[in-house]
Image: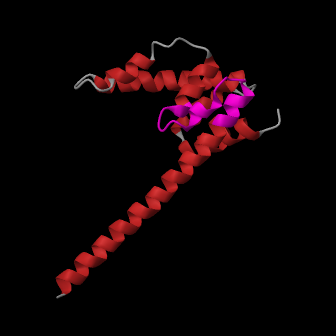
Amino acid sequence: MYENLANGGIFALIAGMIFVTSIIFIGLYIYMGFAFMAIAKKAKLKSPGLAWIPSVGPLIIAFQTSKMHWWPWLLLVGTLIPVIGFIFSIAFGVFSIIWMWKMFEAIKKPGWWAIFVLIFPVWLALIGVAAWSKE
């Protein structure tokens, strides 16, 4: 009898955690979409709506704003290769930070803000400042 009650409680706990996590991810997605769309408009990009593409939208905006070469996108494909995909992931992460650095500089913000991508809450705040500040 108590086994069913315990199983129901564990199920409810897991369902609640999934619900809260989903709400947080949806909120972050909306925030990032609006922020990178505003950055794209500041940088006068032709299609700021690309910011809404899940996972890679902000990177596309950073890439277009930085006006760098396209070939690092091949590293993203390389992440799917077993065994050496980890090395490709690290390389793509480094290029993502470089693109963010150049993006911040393109909209007249300090490029070193891109390093804060490693401290996610600070980076989120800096993205908001970059997107909606008057300068």
Residue closest to the eye, 41 or 102: 41
Question: 49 or 97: which is nearer to us?
Answer: 49
In the rendered image, residue 52 lying in the magenta stretch gets the answer yes
Lateral position of residue 74 relative to residue 62, left or right: left
Estimate the x, y position of residue 41 in percent, counting from the top left: 72, 30
Left or right of residue 68: residue 74: left
Quadrant assignment, res 119: top right
Measuring 49% from the left and 51% from the top, which residue is drawn there?
25
Relative placement, left or right, of 5 versus 110 is left
The image quarter containing residue 38 is: top right
Q: Is residue 56 left or right of residue 68?
A: left
Residue 96 covered by magenta stretch: no
Residue 102 on image: x %, y %:
63, 20
Please tell me which residue is depicted at 41% across the width and 21% down the height of the picture: 91
Q: Quadrant of the C terminus?
A: top right
* Residue in the picture at 64% in, 21% down: 65
| Tag count | 0
| Residue located 83% across and 36% down the image | 134
Percent coordinates x, y for residue 79 in the rendering: 33, 25
Q: Position of residue 90 (x, y in %)?
A: 39, 25
* 18 to 27, vertically: above or below: below
Coloring basis for residues: secondary structure
Which residue sits furthest bottom?
Answer: 1
The answer to whether 30 is drawn above or below residue 23 in the figure is above
Bounds of the magenta segment? 37-58
Q: On the rendered image, what quadrant is the N terminus found in?
A: bottom left
